[in-house]
Amino acid sequence: MTEKAILEYDGKKFEFPLVRGSENEVAFDVKTLRAATGGLTTIDPGFKNTGSCLSDITFLNGEKGILRYRGYSIEELAEKADFLEVAYLLIFGDLPNTDQLEKFHADIRKQSVVDDDIKKIIDAFPKSAHPMGVLSSLTSALTAFNPSSVNVNSDEAMYNAIVKILGKFPVLVAWSMRKKQGLPLDYGSSKLGYVENVLKMMFNQPNEDYVQNDIIVNALDKLLILHADHEQNCSTSTVRIVGSSHAGLFASLSAGISALWGPLHGGANQAVLEMLQAIKEDGGDTKKYMAKAKDKNDPFRLMGFGHRVYKNFDPRAKIIKVAADEVLSDLGVNDPILDIAKGLEQEALNDPYFVERKLYPNVDFYSGIIYQAMGIPVEMFTVMFALGRLPGWIAQWKEMRFRKEPIGRPRQIYTGENLRAFVEIEKR
Ligand code: CMC
């Protein structure tokens, strides 16, 4: 097969090489387009057809519904690995052996406190603040307490920055919830596992002994693994593009959290639960909401459905659906919302509108039902997503810097006014 593409424009032919990935994905390499054509550019709103980088981290095939981290299938990782192992895999490229994992965890534990002055910042937020806004601000504030930016040429400095953020982030996650609930801020315990400790920091009551629930620990571990990376999505692209200006790791992560917050991205998990709740309160009439989702004059969308890349089942949604059944039954929770969700899914999968557009349930469709059964407040759902996505963001930021990618700076086609003479204010 020819490994070049030819573009014909204005009677001239321009040749561009092809780039082939390890899973045989092919791209036109248009790096020389402007130089070769004398300034032509491409236009691709939402980057629907544009690859922004080469990456070794995550493979995703949206037509076949395949997701792999560093070559390992998401199904196998969700079943056999724990979240910290997956974080190590994403960030450093290989699964850790026992010594590497123990050292990684021990180094993270040493970093699992934040400067006490962070509490003053939290105190300044109103209780009504959304925890995602609080988390983004606090992550940004970490830069003030750690002002020197990471020396990306030093493995040791990179490693230290990585364990630092992996240690401190769960504290900020938990505190963004406790502030809202008016509970004292808790540091958890260095004797606990990473995920166990997050839950303790979130749910420990000041006047009770904390009792760990293994069903909840295992369910959260699995959910975090499923959210840990998803190649060049909106928040990850944000982290990479902010970092491409050589802004620091924590500042780039804070920007990623803000990008994740939107309801078309990570904020969909909160939006799904609110939608299911509204359907329930409205008498459970799923057909009415299906009709709204299909009505082009109605802004309503079926939240948790559709995906930019998956034109088949999101493999994460398949795992989460099974987990939702298991976790609710193990916890003895009978939530009618799960039945509404299943009913909506069945209707959508048989509806020509959804079938023609290849709209399937995505990762956010069932995850909120599990979070709710675990006792996690709805406003914290996207925060939990951010906790899971943290290793992916770190891995992608590190890769972007190691590959010495140029600053992200897209082009545009200007469609505004041509040159106009300035009009004095009294004459306007
Ligand atoms: N409900 C109703 N119609 C939909 C939906 C939906 N959830 N999603 C897409 N469509 C329609 C859309 O109106 C369009 O129809 P037409 O071709 O007639 O104009 C067609 O399907 C293609 O949609 P699009 O908006 O062009 O697709 P996109 O790739 O730009 O958007 C998406 C992808 C995820 C933003 C979108 O499917 C959506 O808004 N879904 C609901 C929000 C959601 O669940 N987001 C979570 C995504 S997965 C996790 C994550 O990224 O964090």
Image (cartoon, rainbow, N blue to C red):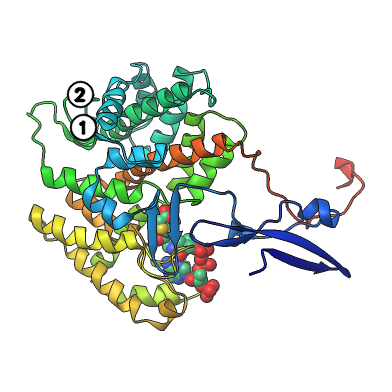
Q: Which amino acid does label 1 sit on?
A: Asn
Please tell me which residue lies in front, 149 or 357.
Answer: 149
Under circle 1, the secondary element is: helix
Q: Residue 307: where, in percent of width, then height?
A: 44, 63
Secondary structure under tag 2 reads loop
Q: Name the residue under label 2.
A: 190
Q: Can residue 130 be seen by looking at this rendering?
A: no
**281 above or below 428?**
below
Crowding near the residue tagged with mark 1, few <14, some 14–19, many ≥20 C-alpha atoms within 10 Å: many
CB under 8 Å between discs 1 and 2? yes
Q: Quadrant of the N terminus?
A: bottom right
Query: Where is mark 1, residue-wise?
Result: 197
> Is residue 256 placed above or below 318 in the rendered structure?
above
Residue 15 lies in what quarter of the image? Answer: bottom right
Q: Which of 278 and 360 is in front in this view?
A: 360
Q: Name the amino acid type tagged 2.
A: Ser
How busy is the neighbourhood of tag 2: few (under 14 within 10 Å), some, or many (20 plus)? some
At 47% from the left and 51% from the top, the residue drawn is 231
Q: Is residue 262 above or below residue 320?
A: above
| Residue 17 in sight from this viewpoint | yes
